[in-house]
Amino acid sequence: MRRRSLLSWLSIVSTIAIWLILIGPLITLFVKLSPSEIVSALDQPGALSPLGISVASAAIALAFTVLGGTPLAYALARSRRRGLRWLEVGMLLMLLMPPLVIGLLLVFMLGPLTPLGELLSRVHLSATNTFFALIVCEVYEAAPYYVLGAQSTFAGLDQAMLDQASLLGNTPRERFFRISLPLSLPQLSSSLAIAWARAIGAFGAVVIVAYHPYGLPMQVWTTLNEVGLSRALPYALVLLVVSLPLPLLAYAWSRYAQR
Amino acid sequence: MLSANFLIDRREGDVELSFCVPPGRRLGIFGPSGAGKTTALDVVAGLAMPRHGDVSLAGRPLTKVTAEDRTIFVPPHERQVGLIRQRPTLFPHLSVRENLLYGKGVKSFELLAPMIERLELMDLLTSRPRQLSGGEAQRVSIARTLARENQALLLDEPFQGLDDRLRTELLLVLDELLSALQIPVVMVAHELELVSHFADDIIVVENGRALGFGEVRKLLKEPPSVKLASILGFTHFVAIDGLRRIGIHPDRMFAGAEPTRGYVFPVSILSTKDVGGGVLYRLKLADQQLVASFADDRLSHSEDPKVTVLDPPVFGQDDECQGIWRGMTSSVEGAVDERR
C-alpha cells in the first residue's frame, strides 16, 4: 500500500475540519430543535403567514428578475458594445454592495417624499413597509446573482456552434430559443436557485424599508428580540426548508446535465 | 457564381484575397496554418466583416463594404451558404435525427434518406452526439449541412483529425454527393494532397496573400515561380545552364536514365535504407543533398548511378518571385472571370 505523505494527511484533516466548521450551524440547528418545540411554535394562529409572504414575494421578485435579467445577461454576454460593459460594472457594484446600504439608499430613492415615491403613490403603490417594498428589496438583493451567473453561462456557449445554427438558417431569436436557452437551462437554474435563496433570505434592506409585513427573516428577527432564541429557531428551520430544496435540486440537475 | 474580393484585418495581419467559383466547380485554398484561409471562408459565410470588399453569390450581393461605409451585409442565416468545419459542432441536446433535420427549409426525411444511407447514418439516428465517434460526428455534420438547399458550400479542413482510411472514404463519399449538386464549393486545407484530389482550381495562400492561382493539375505541374513551387512540394532547384533552373519534386523522379522523359542527372549515393515497400536514398545531385524513395535498389547496383527528373518546371532568373501574385496568367480560361 502506498504511504500517504504528511502533506496529504494534513490536507485531508483540514478538508474535514473546514467542512465541519461550515456545516456546523446546520448540525446545531437539528441538535437544538425538538419536535415538540417546532409544533408548539408553528401551531399558533398566524404563525405560518410569514411563510406565505416570503414565498409569494420571492416568487414575484424572481419572475421579474428572470424576465428582465435573462435578456440583459444575454446582451452582456454576446454583445461587444462598449456601453454594455458599464452595465456589467453596475451589476457587479450591486452584487458587492452591503444589503443594509441598499436599504438606506432605497429610502432616499423610493421614499414617500421623493419624486419616484410620488410617482409610485399615483399608482397607489408605496415602497415603505408594504408587500411591494418587500419585493423591491428582494429584487435588489437577488437579481445581480442571477444576472451575473446567467451572463457567464451565456458567455460560455460555443461560438462555432452558434455560428452553425445561423448558417443553418436560424435568426438570432430562433437561435436563442432553440440552442442558447436549452443548452444553458441547467446552469441558469443554478443561478436562479441562488437568487431564490438570496431573495427569500433577504434581510439587510428589508429591515430598513419593509419591516412590515413580516416575511420569514423578519419573523425570526422579531421573535428573537421579543420572545427569545428558542422560539426563533423553528422559524429558522422553516426558512431553511423553503430556501434550500430548490438550490439543491438545481445543483443536482446541472451536475447531471454536465455528465 | 460565387465571387469574393476583400481585405480583412486580423490580429495576425490582414488578408487580401480575390476569387471566383462557378457553379459545379471546386476551389481549393491551400496554405500553411495561419495563412488566412479560414478567415476567407468566414467572410463568404457572413461571419466576419471585411474592411472593404464584396462577396456575391448567384448574382446576389451578400457583402459590400467600401472604405467609406457598409452598404450591404446579408446576415449568415439569409445567405444559404453551407459551412462544414473541422470540428463537427453538433447540437448536443438534440438526437442525430434532430440534428440532421435542424436546418431551415431542409428537405423531407424521405428525400434525405439516400444521402443518410450513403453516409451510413441510418443506425445512428436516435443517438446523441456525445455517443458518436469523431468520424461519425463529422458525417452527421456533413449530412446536416447538405440537407439544406445551399447555394454554395464551404469546407474548412473537414477531414482534419480523422485517420487516413476514414478520410479517404469520406472524401470519396463527399465527392460523389457534391457531384450531384451544381453549386460552387470552396475547400480550405493545409495538406496539398487533399486539395489536389478534391479541387479543380487552387489558390495558394501565405501570410494573407495569394501566391498563385490556377487549375490544380497545371499549377502542380508548372508552378509559375520558385517560391510557389517550393510551397507545392518542390524541394530542390538545380541549375541546368547559366540562366535556367529546374524544380525537383521527390515524388517525380525515378532511378535510371531516360532522356526522353525528363532531365537526367548523375548522382552519388550517400546512404540507403530499406523501408519495406521501397528503398530510401540519400543522394547528392549537383552539389545538393536530397532524399528520394524508389521502388527497388537498382540504383545501388549501377556503376554510374543516374536519376531522371520527370518533366520538371523550368525557371528563368526573373522567376524569383518574392511572394507577389505575378499577374497570374489564369489557366482556367473562360471558367473564371478575373474581376480584380
Image (cartoon, coloured by chain):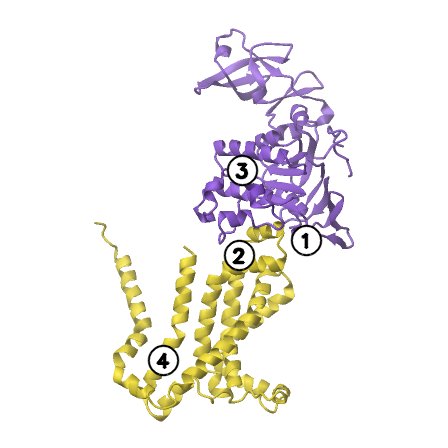
Chain colours: A yellow, B purple
Which of the 4 quarters of the picture holds residue B57?
top right
Q: Is residue A219 above or below residue B294?
A: below
Q: Which residue is mark 4?
A: A238
Residue type at the position of mark 2: Leu
Tell me whether marks 4 and 1 sit on the same chain: no
- Residue at the (31%, 75%) spot, across then down: A26
How would you rate the neighbour count of disc 4 (Cα within 10 Å): few for under 14, some for 14-19, many for 20 or more? Answer: some
- Separation of residues labelled 3 and 4 (CA atoms): 59 Å
- The chain that hosts pointer 4 is A
Determine whether, in the image, residue A201 is placed left or right of residue B312. Answer: left
Tell me whether marks 3 and 2 sit on the same chain: no
Secondary element at tag 4: helix
Question: Is residue A94 or residue A36 the one in the foreground?
Answer: A36
Q: Which mark is residue B75?
A: 1
- Separation of residues labelled 3 and 1 (CA atoms): 27 Å
In front of the other: label 4 or label 2?
A: 4
Residue type at the position of mark 1: Pro
Determine whether, in the image, residue B334 is placed left or right of residue B39. Answer: right
Q: Are marks 3 and 2 in contact (CB under 8 Å)?
A: no
- The chain that hosts pointer 2 is A
Secondary element at tag 3: loop
Q: Is residue A95 visible?
A: no
Residue type at the position of mark 3: Phe
- Residue at the (45%, 19%) spot, across then down: B277
If you read the primary sequence from the N terminus, does the residue marked by circle 4 or circle 2 appear first?
2
How would you rate the neighbour count of disc 1 (Cα within 10 Å): few for under 14, some for 14-19, many for 20 or more? Answer: some
Secondary element at tag 1: loop
Q: Which residue is mark 3?
A: B159
- Separation of residues labelled 3 and 2 (CA atoms): 24 Å
